[in-house]
Amino acid sequence: MRELVFALSYEPGTNAIADALAEYPEARIRSLSLHATPESLWRVDHATGSPAALAAIEETVRTADYYADCLAADDCGAKQTTEVLEHSEDTLVVYSYWERSATCVSVPHIAIDTLGDGLLFETLNRGREYTWRVIHSGTGEVRRFVEALEATLSDGVSMELRRMSPAGGSPGERPSLVDGLPPEQREALRAAVENGYYEVPREIDGSELADKLGIPRSTLTYRLRRAEAHVMGEHVDELGVDEPTSPL
């Protein structure tokens, strides 16, 4: 089994949940259970935060068209049900279910198509960042998953790889990444890891890291994206430094 962690980031106006959470930085939405079949998706989520934050989240999940993970940029015509199971002073538990239409697509459905069956999902929403943790068998096509997801994301939404590793594997079982990368991509990836670019929250942003390396930010972004694609395609996560192993 292998673990894949990545984050989707939303610019203002591109995701109703992200817009609501951005107003309340202390609020969090964590999945308690998430399941998908080729035809449908259902999940239970646990939100925490101030009473005002929970009220805003509840209003959003009751009215937002795409809360249950549909990535379609326009109304896809899916049948959706949302129910509030609990709403106390500091806790909100929400159940949501939707049946796919011909144009519906989501992270779990892309994963089913490319990574195979037996998948486990864990998610965390905070601010404008939506972090996914996927446990899969390791026999699927990770590169195709990444390409399909990136091709589906609408304008204003970006994806960033956070971690990829054997689930329960020992460090000695991991192949080397740096030998397979061009020197400039290797340098960018090492610098990103060593300076906390992939930490949650980040210890350095892209502009600061680019300044450290003496290159334009656009060049850094390109090198990191190419290096991350290599990581995804080769199922490799050993960067020569210790990486975080804590859950979301």
Image (cartoon, helix red, strand yellow):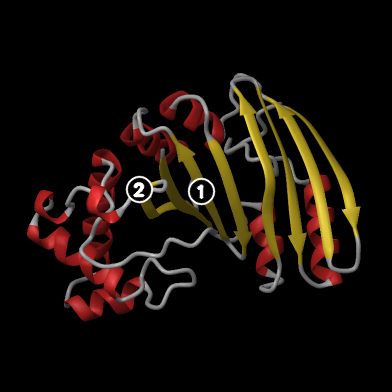
Q: Secondary structure at mark 2?
A: loop
Say which residue appears at 57% left-offset and 38% top-offset.
Answer: 71
Q: What number is the disc on residue 169?
A: 2
Q: Is residue 19 left or right of residue 220?
A: right
Q: Is residue 22 left or right of residue 48?
A: left
Sequence-wise first label, 2 or 1 = 1
In the rendered view, would you say 53 is above or below 75? below
The answer to whether any part of residue 63 appears in the image is: yes
In the rendered view, would you say 240 is above or below 17? below
Tell me which corner region of the image, top left, top right, bottom left or bottom right, holds residue 183: bottom left
Looking at the picture, which amino acid does disc 1 mark? Answer: Arg
**Residue 180 location in percent, x, y?**
11, 48
Q: Quadrant of the C terminus?
A: bottom right
Q: Is residue 214 left or right of residue 52?
A: left
**Residue 1 location in percent, x, y?**
41, 38
The answer to whether any part of residue 14 appears in the image is: no
Q: Which residue is mark 1?
A: 133
Q: Residues within 10 Å of mark 1 (few under 14, many from 20)?
A: many
Say which residue appears at 19% left-offset and 48% top-offset.
Answer: 175
Say which residue appears at 47% left-offset and 36% top-offset.
Answer: 152
In the rendered view, would you say 71 is above or below 40? below
**Residue 189 location in percent, x, y?**
23, 63
Tell me which corner region of the image, top left, top right, bottom left or bottom right, holds residue 162: bottom left
Determine the CA span between mark 2 and mark 1: 16 Å
Q: What number is the disc on residue 183?
A: none
Looking at the picture, which amino acid does disc 2 mark? Answer: Gly
In the rendered view, would you say 23 is above or below 8? below
Say which residue appears at 37% left-offset and 39% top-offset.
Answer: 146
